[in-house]
């Protein structure tokens, strides 16, 4: 059994980019549906640090950040695997908030604005034909049913890797494993001792771990490493944490002295930092679906939010009939690359210096006498308020 509904825009994925885009479009009077395969609220693998460049934008959407007493993060500490470290003030800074809290609140705002949110619904196919889209989806709890949506435009906000990426055989999916595309990420929430205004990035062999405070005096502990590291430890997260990650003395203390608030971590595999296209078969990609900055640079959440704003501005012109579809796609890609491509390039360059123990140890030692270089690297991976 199937049902069909017409929309101006279908958004596939209800994360930061998808929800904020849907809210903006609905405020302009457009009919929008968001497909999300999970049910709010839920945890996502994410560093949960947002640059201050996004603060005003989120408040304009209706998120009451000023009322939530969130930790304001102004200091950075980076440690090498041997425990040597460098500290530096963040030029702009940021704040900590969990995706569990923020995504859920954005979903409430979207629902109140009139966005149709179909939770626990997995998109199976997106087809463009005769200047319109048909989107086919299946409710997770009723797989005998099928939902068909017709739309003038579809936006892909389905994150780091999805079944649609695989179905389409996107370029980053087809690439053989390399130094940019075969990562796993693991996230916990913990209670620990660390300055509330500090984000720390602790390096270990073939990976790094970020920790910073979020709401309610909890901390987000999230690390990225290679699939090879996990295989070397018999595919055991616990063994890898003990034998590889805790060689860094900072991480040894964190993992042995913190109170872990999950029964088990949130994990995602097959993460790729290879280049992606921002438009695939006329679908506009936003958020991580369009391109991922390395977490070491701590700016993915702001990029997703900013991308939603530039997508909204171009989509609005298209829906008003002011620009053609071809021009919409061209202008969106050009603007996206203007804002983010240099950040991604710098992120990949920085990540290449944080892998081998000796290289990371040497790099951190080299950075210490040159605070202006640290400042320059931070500025190259962050934007300005939008």
Image (cartoon, rainbow, N blue to C red):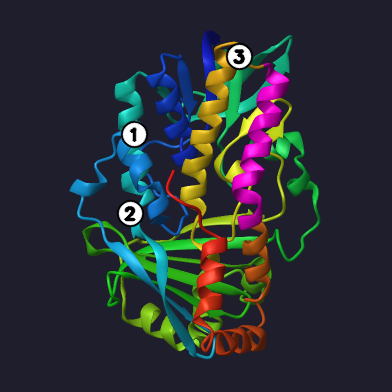
SS for callout 2: loop
Give the crowd class for mark 3: few <14, some 14-19, many >=20 residues within 10 Å: few
Mark 1–mark 2 Cα distance, whole angstroms, equals 16 Å
Q: Which residue is mark 2?
A: 97
Q: Which residue is mark 1?
A: 61
State left or right for residue 130 relative to residue 75. right
Q: Is residue 284 visible?
A: yes
Give the crowd class for mark 2: few <14, some 14-19, many >=20 residues within 10 Å: many
SS for callout 3: loop
Mark number, residue 279: none
Q: Position of residue 367 (x, y in %)?
A: 56, 84
Mark 3–mark 1 Cα distance, whole angstroms, equals 25 Å
Q: Which residue is mark 3?
A: 322
Which image quadrant for residue 59? top left
In the rendered structure, which disc, 1 or 2, sits on the residue that comes first in sequence? 1
Q: Is residue 145 visible?
A: no
Q: Residue at x 66, y 56 (%)?
A: 273
Which quadrant: the N terminus? Answer: top right
In the rendered structure, which disc, 3 or 1, sits on the residue that comes first in sequence? 1
- The residue segment tinted magenta is 324-343
Which image quadrant for residue 258? bottom left
Residue 228 colored in magenta in the image: no
Q: Residue at x 71, y 54 (%)?
A: 274
Which image quadrant for residue 319? top right
Q: Nearer the viewer, mark 1 or mark 2?
A: 1
Q: Position of residue 202 (x, y in %)?
A: 48, 77
């Amino acid at each position: 059994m199937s049902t069909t509904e017409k929309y101006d825009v279908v958004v596939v994925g209800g994360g930061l980019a998808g929800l904020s885009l849907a809210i903006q479009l609905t405020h302009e009077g457009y009919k929008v549906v968001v497909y999300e395969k999970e049910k709010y609220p839920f945890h996502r693998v994410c560093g949960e640090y947002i640059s201050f460049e996004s603060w005003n934008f989120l408040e304009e959407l209706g998120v009451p950040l000023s009322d939530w007493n969130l930790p304001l993060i102004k200091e950075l500490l980076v440690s090498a695997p041997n425990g040597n470290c460098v500290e530096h003030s963040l030029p702009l800074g940021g704040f900590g908030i969990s995706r569990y809290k923020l995504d859920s609140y954005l979903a409430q705002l979207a629902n109140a604005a009139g966005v149709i949110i179909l939770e626990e619904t997995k998109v199976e196919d997106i087809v463009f034909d005769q200047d319109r889209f048909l989107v086919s989806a299946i409710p997770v709890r009723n797989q005998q049913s099928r939902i068909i949506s017709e739309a003038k435009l579809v936006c892909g906000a389905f994150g780091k890797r999805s079944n649609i990426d695989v179905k389409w055989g996107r370029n980053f999916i087809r690439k053989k494993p390399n130094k940019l595309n075969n990562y796993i990420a693991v996230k916990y929430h913990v209670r620990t001792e660390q300055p509330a205004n500090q984000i720390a990035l602790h390096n270990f062999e073939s990976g790094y771990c970020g920790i910073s405070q979020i709401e309610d005096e909890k901390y987000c502990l999230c690390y990225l490493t290679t699939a090879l590291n996990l295989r070397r430890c018999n595919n055991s997260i616990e063994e890898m944490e003990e034998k590889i990650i805790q060689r860094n003395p900072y991480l040894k203390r964190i993992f042995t002295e913190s109170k872990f608030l999950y029964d088990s971590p949130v994990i995602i595999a097959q993460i790729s930092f290879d280049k992606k296209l921002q438009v695939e078969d006329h679908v506009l990609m936003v958020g991580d679906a369009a391109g991922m900055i390395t977490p070491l640079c701590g700016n993915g959440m702001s990029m997703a939010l900013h991308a939603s704003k530039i997508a909204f501005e171009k989509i609005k012109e298209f829906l008003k009939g002011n620009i053609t579809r071809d021009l919409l796609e061209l202008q969106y890609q050009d603007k996206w690359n203007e804002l983010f491509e240099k950040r991604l390039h710098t992120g990949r360059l920085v990540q290449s210096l944080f892998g081998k123990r000796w290289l990371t140890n040497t790099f951190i030692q080299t950075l210490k006498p040159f605070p202006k270089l640290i400042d320059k690297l931070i500025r190259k991976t962050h934007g300005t308020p939008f």
